[in-house]
Image (tube, rainbow, N blue to C red):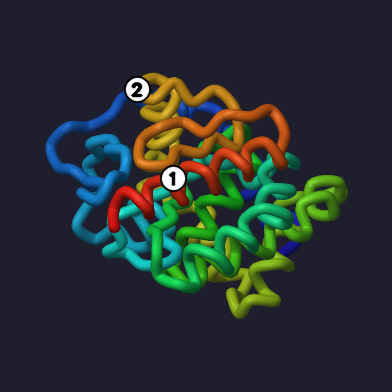
Amino acid sequence: MVHNKGHKAMRFLVMAAGIFALAACDDSSIGGSDNGSLDLPDVEVAEAATGVYGPIIYGNPDAKITVVEYASLTCPHCANFNALVFPEIKEKYLDTGLIRFEYRNFVMNSYDLAASVVARCETQDMAKKMHEAFFKTQRQWLAGPNQVDAMAGIARRLGMSRVAFDKCLADKDMQVYLGELTQHASQALKVDKTPTIFVMGDEVEGSSLDDMKADIFARLDKALADAE
């Protein structure tokens, strides 16, 4: 059984290498919000598709002030942002309902794609729990001898069986969507690093987490003051 799972995981990782070359479809749209969010790409999604398409949304979904983060689940800087900066944003702006925060995947490699597909398999709440767990244990599961099995172990602790995990991992609709999301960010928005943060459509500056945090807070405070 373990041997078969290993082969399934390997087939996924080989297949994933071609996902990012796919061109965007144009028959239907998963649109962004109209409250300052950056547009999302036009992507055709089958009616039977399940899971979370579009951004993972934190805070007040109807807030006038929007922050967008493009991040990779295998990026150490993104894990540090999640651990050191996001909690302060949450306490000051999200828990108080002042802003809408959108997490968008910018997929960097096949392991990132695998984790991102599984994280988005069920609901917004599960996606948030998965992201938190993958970021918090990033060093451990990436450094292990079998990254996919390590991901499955994390998912199991959150209530997802191995059977459900394998089914999620094989979700081609979500794989394609995440490839499209990444391609759109790179080509249309010129995202070339993670994390990349936008406040009301303007990219945050700073090469360090402290600089980025200062710029985010300054932009948000100004936007909230202007909105009063």
What number is the disc on residue 68? 1
Q: Quadrant of residue 198?
A: top left
Quadrant position of the N terminus in the picture: bottom right
Mark 2 element type: helix
Q: Give me the residue at 68% from left, 48% from top.
A: 81
Q: Quadrant of residue 60?
A: bottom left
Cβ–Cβ under 8 Å for marks 2 and 1: no
Rendered position, 153 above or below 215: below
- Taking depth in this image into account, of 112 and 164 the one nearest to the observer is 112
Locate residue 130, reporting x and y percent. Answer: 60, 64
Q: Give me the residue at 74% from left, 48% from top.
A: 80
Rendered position, 54 above or below 10: below
- Specify which label sits upstream in the sequence, 2 or 1: 1
- Taking depth in this image into account, of 47 and 75 the one nearest to the observer is 75
Rendered position, 16 above or below 34: above
Is any part of residue 39 visible from this angle? yes
- The residue to which callout 2 is attached is 188
- Taking depth in this image into account, of 48 and 97 the one nearest to the observer is 97
